[in-house]
Image: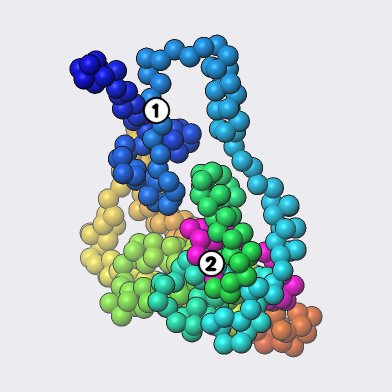
Amino acid sequence: MSDSAQGQAPKNPKLRSACDQCNLSKVKCSGHRDGCTRCRNLRVECVYGESRVGKVQPPRKRKKSEQHTVSIESPIRIDEGSLEVALQQWPSDTWGATSWEGDTLSLNDMFENLDATVDTNNNSSADDTLDSMISLDALGSQPSPASRLLSGSSTTSSRDSALSILESNRNSGSSVTPKVPHPLPTLPSSTNLPSSRTAAQSEPILTRSKMDSKCFLACTQILITLENYIVSELKALDLILSVVRKACDELRRLIQYQQESRCDRCLFLFVATMHQVVELLDAGSRCMNDNEDAHHDMPGALNSGFIPSFGFGGFSVSAEDQRSWKVHLIRRETQHVDEAFKCLVALSKLGPPSCAPTDPESVKQRENCITGLQTRFKEICERMFE
């Protein structure tokens, strides 16, 4: 009898490899019987149901279980509009002054305190909490981590646990700030509107000042590079023309950026850069003239055929043709400098934003600062083209 009784004793049911929470959410479960990793992180009860492997259910029972599964697995959608209305109707008396030294907390401050509670440690003081609230208010334009609560990234169990904590705290009337796994979204309040308007008005000013600073630094880099060439006494005309072309192209781009702000600091640096460009061209032209004078002072036997001529069939390029080609190349490179001068003159005519553009005296004074430099540049070009 004892053997038959032992044989008829019910066996322990075989449990599923995944817990009920992971099975409903269709995610991989770690399978720990004392609590899987996901349930521990979400702080929910980890329950393993009986395995259905190898068991055949009747049609009626199978239909009921399928309907129940569909109703459970249907996603819970939280209407943001209804949530905002419910939060606006939330009585704020229960949220009295707790550890904020008598400050009156509004609805917006309540949710900022929730964000501060999550970001700070449990043993932080009241001053640390206020500092975190100020930092959150200053960074209000950035998306809060709480937006992930309503975007569907968190699971059904985490939403239920967060809402249940808030509901229980409200019913109990406790003044302690609740600790939730995710902070709720910050609602806009009328107190934040003036600060947002002020930030929107100051944004173009900050953007303009940043652009002026970038132009100033870029022009300073050009000045340093050109000054190094001047100090090293660069006299090779081909290298000078290459350096001048790159500097003028970059300078024209910076002048285009200054059409709106017209910063005085940048305008002064533009004029200083053109002074350096003219100085380099002057050194290159003098070196070219000295070399040509040395060639002319050579004996007549070498003077006529010093520059070798080359030809293609019945056509040949003489020394005079080579010189004209060289003058053409120099004229083409100096065209970049001439265009940079034109852009600089047009910018100087506009003047700073505070100055009236129609004042003829101020326009003439600004032009005189560049006219002398432009005249010197034309004299250097004529000397090289002779």
User: What type is the residue that disc 2 sits on?
Assistant: Pro
| 231 horizontally vs 335: left or right | left
Towards the viewer: 89 or 44: 44
Image position of 210 (left or right of 308): right
At 63% from the left and 78% from the top, the residue drawn is 96
- Residue 308 visible somewhere in the drawing: yes
Q: Is residue 353 left or right of residue 124?
A: right
Secondary structure of the residue carrying tag 1 is loop
Q: Are marks 1 and 2 in contact (CB under 8 Å)?
A: no
Observer-side mark, 1 or 2, equals: 1
Magenta residues span 177-198
Above or below, comparing residue 41 to residue 353 in the picture: above
Residue 40 pos. (x, y %): 37, 50
Is residue 76 placed above or below 363 in the rendered structure? above
> Mark 1 packing: few (<14 Cα in 10 Å), some, or many (20+)?
some
Q: Which mark is residue 178?
A: 2
Q: Give the image quarter of residue 289.
A: bottom left
x 32%, y 23%: residue:
10
The residue lying toward the viewer, choosing from 353 and 383, is 353
In-front residue for pair 319/255 = 255
Disc 1 marks which amino acid?
A: Glu
